[in-house]
Image (cartoon, rainbow, N blue to C red):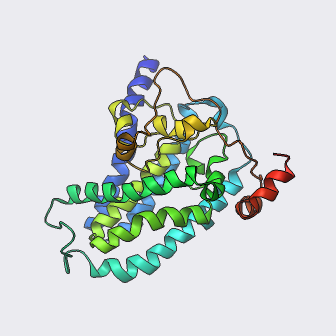
Amino acid sequence: MKNIAKEILAYILWPILLGVPIFLVYTGIRIDRPTLYFNIAYLGLAATLFVLERLMPYREEWVKSDGQEFPDFAHTVLNKGLIQLALFLLLISGIIHTMGDSTPRPYWPSGLPLAVQVVLAMVISEFGLYWAHRLEHTWSFLWRFHSVHHSVEKLWFFNTGRFHFVDTFNSLLFSIPLLFLLGVPGDVFIYFSSITAFIGLLTHCNIDLHCGVLNYIFNTPNVHRWHHSKKVEEGNNNYGENLLLFDMIFGTFYYPRDRHVGPLGIKEHMPKAFIGQLVAPFRWNKTQKKQGR
């Protein structure tokens, strides 16, 4: 009976884990407290994933420490968090408040239902995110920075934000400016950025989930694990941030159903310390030669 309940939970859990935080953001927007409610939703989701990763892990060995907790935390706060905070302060405070219902832009279909506008914003941004991500895997210069993220040998919610600051800036550059130029309303942008943050946590979670048809629409953990495969021919796929639409269109969707993903990580050397990981992309050749690679 216990196994049956766990199997049912594995099928329904992903949409619940995404839906509840989105509802909290919706509540925050309605009472004009979106930032507070987003923080509650994000931290609540992180805490829930921490518990579930121990109750129903995808891989037991990924529950054990890999010694990268501090670098993961430092990258998340300093490299990803501060750049996104700067974007919030420079763009959201200065631009978003002049957009929306008060001064709708002719380029944005503000007459459409809010949910449709959010989906449209996600698709538009996804196009830029897809190509930014694909370039990071195929252009050796950008791979140096992106490899910091891929150097982990296990996936769990805590290393979701492990990105070099150059990598973070590149992704934002390819996705955010177009939304502002189109005049995306403030509420739509809040929903879009919140959903992106929530899906980001979920893609890395070490939870045994069965997402079914959702694996062909969203960047679920089942699909994203293949993107972290140490085998280049497997890892150079599934570039979508939130949606897999452009992976489907451009032939980079990869999801074998007959086996589980093998070892994760990169073939190059990556220092274990946070400062070393920050510096390594700027002195890439020396770093690799030093390790005899």
Q: Is residue 30 left or right of residue 289?
A: left
Q: Is residue 293 left or right of residue 12?
A: right
Residue at the (60%, 38%) spot, across then down: 232
**Which residue occupies the foreground of this view, 166 or 142?**
142
Q: Is residue 46 visible?
A: yes
Residue 77 percent location from the top left of the image: 60, 64
Q: Is residue 78 above or below residue 196?
A: below
User: Quadrant of the rendered structure where residue 163 is?
Assistant: bottom right
Q: Is residue 30 left or right of residue 21?
A: left
Residue at the (72%, 64%) spot, across then down: 282
The C terminus appears in which quarter of the rendering? Answer: top right
Residue at the (55%, 26%) spot, across then down: 260
Q: Is residue 43 above or below residue 106?
A: above
Residue at the (55%, 47%) spot, across then down: 157
Q: How many numbered dots are placed on residues in this image?
A: 0
Residue 275 percent location from the top left of the image: 75, 63
User: Quadrant of the rendered structure where residue 73 is?
Assistant: bottom right
Q: Is residue 59 above or below residue 31?
A: above
Q: Is residue 53 visible?
A: no
The N terminus appears in which quarter of the rendering? Answer: top left
**Which residue occupies the foreground of this view, 246 or 17?**
246
Residue 182 percent location from the top left of the image: 28, 71
Which residue sits furthest left? 111
Q: Is residue 54 above or below residue 96?
A: above
Q: Is residue 151 left or right of residue 4?
A: right
Residue 84 percent location from the top left of the image: 50, 69
Which residue sits furthest top? 1
